Amino acid sequence: MKYNQLGKTPIRISAVSYGCWELGGGPWEFTSDQQNIRSLHKALELGVNTFDTAEGYGNGHSEEIVGIALEGKRRDCVISTKVGRANLHPRDVRRSVEQSLKRLRTDYIDIYYIHWPSFEIPVEDTLSEFNRLKEEKLIRAIGVSNFSIEQLREAIRYAQIDVIQPEYSLLHRQIEREIVPFCLEHSIGIMSYSSIAKGILAGAFHLYGRTLKEDDFRKTRRLFLPEHLEAENELLHLMKEIADRKGAAVSQIAIRWLLEQPGVTSAIVGTQSEKHLVENAEAADLELTGEELRQLEEASSRALAKIDG
């Protein structure tokens, strides 16, 4: 596993982070708490030291499972969690962080995020409380998620923003135009979510015949619309060709591509499968040639021109 410094902080995070949304249940098919605790232990064995959760994942259940699994191993871990949009008033932030600390069984959080920007509470008010939490050593670093470039520019006026967590993958590249250059200029880390596009970039739907159930929350999402699945075919088959040459999984190509992108500190990838967890972790050591990166870039751009054009 490789490790990278997070923004201007001394925190070093694994190039591949464990995304813990699925561990809360919610819209995902669920294995069991026991299986997910084993997976978190396995992640640590593989060198994954960074675990990303949120108070909104399973109404706190994801945080509870992370807390149980990492209890006694806290010094070996970087834990990030998020306060939801409904709790961005300063008094609500304080309550949320206290509840997250209790569920996570820890006395500090390494990275604390605004999960989604508020429509009503000024970011100055929210970040003033974040700054107090940092002064009190309840949190070590401040992050924002799903912020536009305008919102990010405003946020850095009121706090040291150490990291942004945007959606980013071969099939979602909007941040490249403005947010990535801004983060590079201001030494803000980037931790991508939906790094394998909720399973698409693992090849499940294009290469291995999987279909979504009628009640699957992804069915109406942008990348899963039938015409968009068709537009993604060329990219997925190219990824399979590259993966086969390297004896790798298709998902590893998606993760490695992200780690080659400017400014990306860590790719967050979620799973409840130990097999996939091992593959995800090993992607940090995979190598892509300049020609392979060029081919992926071009195939991605052609797919996105059809999807977003």
Image (cartoon, rainbow, N blue to C red):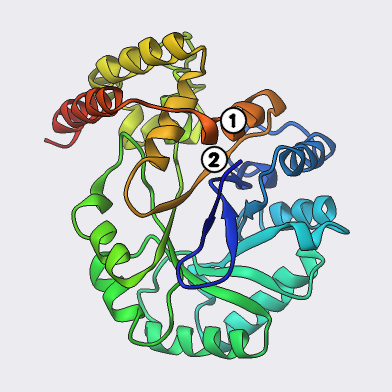
- In what quadrant of the picture does the C terminus appear? top left
Q: Residue at x 47, y 84 (%)?
A: 126
Question: Hey, which quadrant is residue 47 in on the image?
Answer: top right
Along the horizontal axis of the image, is 192 left or right of 180? right
4 sits to left or right of 179: right
Q: Earlier in the sequence, mark 2 or mark 1?
A: 2
Quadrant of the drawing holding the N terminus: top right
Between the residue at mark 2 and the residue at mark 1, the CA separation in whole angstroms equals 12 Å
Disc marking residue 269: 2
Q: Which mark is residue 182?
A: none
- Circle 2 packing at 10 Å, graded few (<14), some (14-19), many (20+), is many
Residue in front for this viewpoint, 9 or 95? 9
Mark 2 secondary-structure assignment: strand
The residue located at (51%, 84%) in the rendering is 89
Instruction: Give the image location of residue 21, x and y in percent.
Output: 60, 47
Task: Confirm whether residue 206 shows in the render.
Answer: no
Structural crowding at the residue carrying mark 1, measured as other residues with C-alpha within 10 Å and reported as few (<14), some (14–19) or many (≥20) = many
Compared across the picture, whether 102 is left or right of 202 comes to right
